[in-house]
Image (spheres, grey):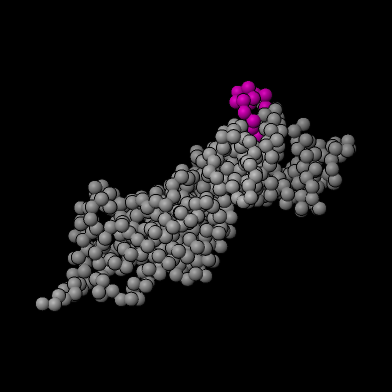
Amino acid sequence: MVNPGAIATTSLVPGADPDDRWHTILGGLSRFAGRGLVVDEDTYASASATNHRNRELVGMLAARGLIAGDPAVALDLYTRQSCVSVTARDLAVMGATLADGGVNPVSGEQVVAPEVCHVVLAAMITAGMYETSGDWLHDVGLPAKSGIGGGIVTVSPGKGGSARSRPPSTPPATASGGNRSPGACLARSGSTCSPRAPTDGPDRSPRPSEPLRCRAMSHEILSGQSALITGGGSGIGLGCAEALAADGATVVLAARNVERLERAAAQLRETGGSVVTVACDVTDESSVAAACAVAAEAGRFTMVVANAGFGSGGPIHLTELDTWNGVLATNLTGAFLTIKHSVPYLAANGGGAIVGVSSIAGPVTHRFMTPYDVSKAGLEMLIRQTADELGPVNIRANAVRPGLVPTDATAGLMAMPEIVEDYLDQMPIRRVGTPADVGALVRFLLGPESSWITGTCISVDGGHHLRRGPDIEPAMELLFGDSRYPALRG
């Protein structure tokens, strides 16, 4: 008799009309998940066409006066809420919300009162697994709920929630949300289930449940989230995209070269990645703002990689002002604009993480690369400022410092064996890097595993930062000859 009770309860949801009542239901589920949820329309169409048993149950309830309002509306609302698409992470966050007296570990919102959680958990432990509830209580001993998509959420009061989507043996169908992504997830709540004390403003005080600690046993730990990657069409940007897409994020690749973007997107889709491309010039503020809007439409926008950049080589006294301005406009101003226009979205989604791609040239001098060095040093200060200023709204910011990585930007250096050899001589781990080396670190800094790390600049360079900068004088001699140094007055 679980379904009749659920349908009767659904009929009690207030609202001026069915659409208003549905908005209340979906909004409540979204607040539990900490993000906006949607209905899986295919599942909804199938369930509506085959819910013969529930139609009979509604008729029985209506005959006994146990349905409020139109029975057909109650059944439709019940069926539709049964088909809300969720991930294992969503379910785990919902469970953690119940475990912590109604406080969502992602948003910090008091979604429902603690006494509501008490009643819900009591119903889950007695009937949440349907005819197998007794066996579950004996074997597991925790409140749980199974759903029509094969998902299960389990709650450990005061500790957290765990979830599994599409387990090998699917329990009987019911009213929980559907799921399109198999996997498992754990979300930890706070250490108490008592209600939060009211305050005059947003509660910024730290607590064990903020931010979310979540570990996935499948490639979906970032599912439902989107990441904007500037300079994402090749090299390090593409390496970052591959790492994020592998863990379920929708990656939004932004760059000026549209053809290169589409090639990168095709490469990611071949391995099952979810990817969106957008033409973007990071020196154009309106272009950056538009790219951020695209990222916000692609998923829950929580991650940013400010990667767009390039360098130039030449003596200080021969560097043209246009060259200087161009490097700083892309590498530093472009990162500033990317951060400026992304943080409102991240804050609205409960927080997020930003990674700026700096360089070993940020902290270590590289002779004849002055505009590039200065732009990267400035980027690192921008990242530290961002971390300090935006920490109170749960936005983290860090930078990575790649060493020598073969990309289009370093092709000139890689073409000169003596320069590559000098680079290698400065590396305790004597090899050049790969985009995947950098992408793995960026993925870590964007994910929940690094939730207490902000304001750092981490080298990924084989230890190059321990020694001196590279000697690129052979290239300068080839390009500038004796003029690479200003003439000394005798």
Query: The N terminus appears in which quarter of the rendering?
Result: top right
Against 267, is 194 above or below? above
- The residue positioned 21% from the left and 61% from the top of the image is 471
Name the one closer to the observer, 58 or 106. Answer: 106
Against 145, is 139 above or below? above
Name the one closer to the observer, 376 or 61. Answer: 376
Image coords of residue 330 (percent x, y): 40, 67
Image coords of residue 417 (percent x, y): 20, 60
Q: Residue furthest front?
A: 200
In this rendering, would 270 be left or right of 300? left
Query: The C terminus appears in which quarter of the rendering?
Result: bottom left
Image coords of residue 37 (percent x, y): 64, 49
Residue 360 picture quarter: bottom left
Residue 403 can be seen in this image: yes
- The residue positioned 33% from the left and 55% from the top of the image is 402
Residue 153 can be seen in this image: no
Magenta span contains residue 141: yes
Q: Residue furthest top?
A: 138
Against 17, is 143 above or below? above
Image coords of residue 375 (percent x, y): 36, 64
- The residue positioned 46% from the left and 45% from the top of the image is 452
Name the one closer to the observer, 251 or 391. Answer: 391
- The residue positioned 39% from the left and 65% from the top of the image is 331
Please tell me how many numbered marks the rendered image carries. 0
Which segment is the magenta one? Answer: 133-148
Magenta span contains residue 223: no
